[in-house]
Amino acid sequence: MPRPEAIPGGMTPREYYGSELRRIREAVTPKLTQEKLGALVFVSGGYIGQLEAAVRVPQLDLSQRIDEALATGGVLERLHSLLDFSRFPDYFKHAKEYESQAISISEFAALIVPGVLQTPDYARAIFLGAEPTRTDEELEQLVAARMERSRIVTNPAGPVLWYVLDEAVLRRVVGSHGISAAQLRYVAELAARRRAIVQVVTYEAGAHALLEGLLCLMTFADSPPLAYSEGPHAGQLLDDTRLVARCHRAYDLVRAAALSPEASLALILSAAEEHENAQA
């Protein structure tokens, strides 16, 4: 089974970056304080402390300035690439790594458009809805991370993608009717361009095998399949063969209950038009 890049001591990438920054700073003779380092790179000593404590995520230009000030040879700039991994919640970061290695991804979404299909405006509204007190910097970092994930959709060499959406995904207003309309138009465009297979389970389908939430199934070229399920602020990566098989069966049942891809595309476009009319 593919494994994410190991980080010493089981630390998150942000914690590892912070520990290396502290090690490098304290190795300066005489020992360099956080305040003195901050003065060298035009930030406060408190900010340096937050970086070392993994409270804040450093910007690339700051990593480069610290490298130059301490003559590290570019160590922190290289470590900065790990932070793409850390921009995702701990419960999702391993699933994200597996996602990038999969040859097929099949996902059911009950409430919102799946992350890799989201537009920037839609993703921004999702993040703000989940945590209205986020700073602009934090918000844009989250949106950028989500947009980076979406590259697998536009990559011709990427995995085969199959999405089943509950009709509630189409009807929910996220951000505004205009944002929701643009999001559905984008999903319809991907389906029309055959970048992803998209089906919709309508309200009329009634109860089905995945009413309770999100499920993502991933297959790999040379390792057993995985399943990933998620709820509010929690997610679970499943590799037990029997449990993954049950997840596949549930997904197959939902896919069978859904409209055909052609009928689903028509419904998505109709819902987009309804949002546009409401916005007007």
Image (spheres, helix red, strand yellow):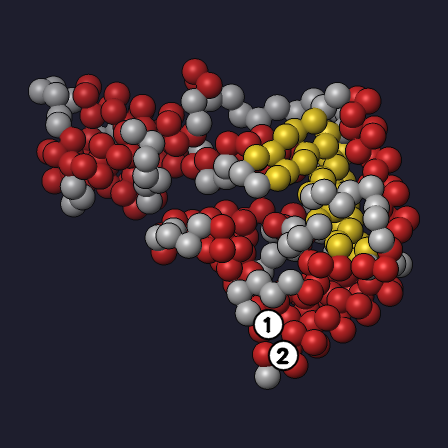
Residue farthest to the top, as pictured: 9
Quick one: SS at disc 1? helix
- 269 or 81, nearer to the observer: 269
What residue is drawn where x is 16% and y is 31%? 34
Residue position for label 2: 278
What residue is drawn where x is 37% and y is 52%? 133
In the rendered image, residue 31, in percent from the top left (x then y), is placed at 12, 21
In the rendered image, residue 21, in percent from the top left (x then y), is placed at 28, 28
Question: Is residue 214 placed above or below 261 in the rendered structure?
Answer: above
Give the spatial CA distance, label 1 vs label 2.
6 Å
Q: What is the crowding at mark 2: few (fewer than 14 residues within 10 Å), some, or many (at least 20)?
A: few
Res 246 seen here: yes
Residue farthest to the front, as pictured: 207
What residue is drawn where x is 46% and y is 40%? 87
Relative placement, left or right, of 262 versus 22 is right
> Are dots 1 and 2 in contact, CB under 8 Å?
yes
Which label was assigned to residue 227?
none
> Where the N terminus falls, by quadrant?
top right
> Where the C terminus falls, by quadrant?
bottom right
What residue is drawn where x is 82% and y is 63%? 264
- 229 or 22, nearer to the observer: 229
Residue position for label 1: 177
Relative placement, left or right, of 137 versus 88 is left
Quick one: SS at disc 2? helix
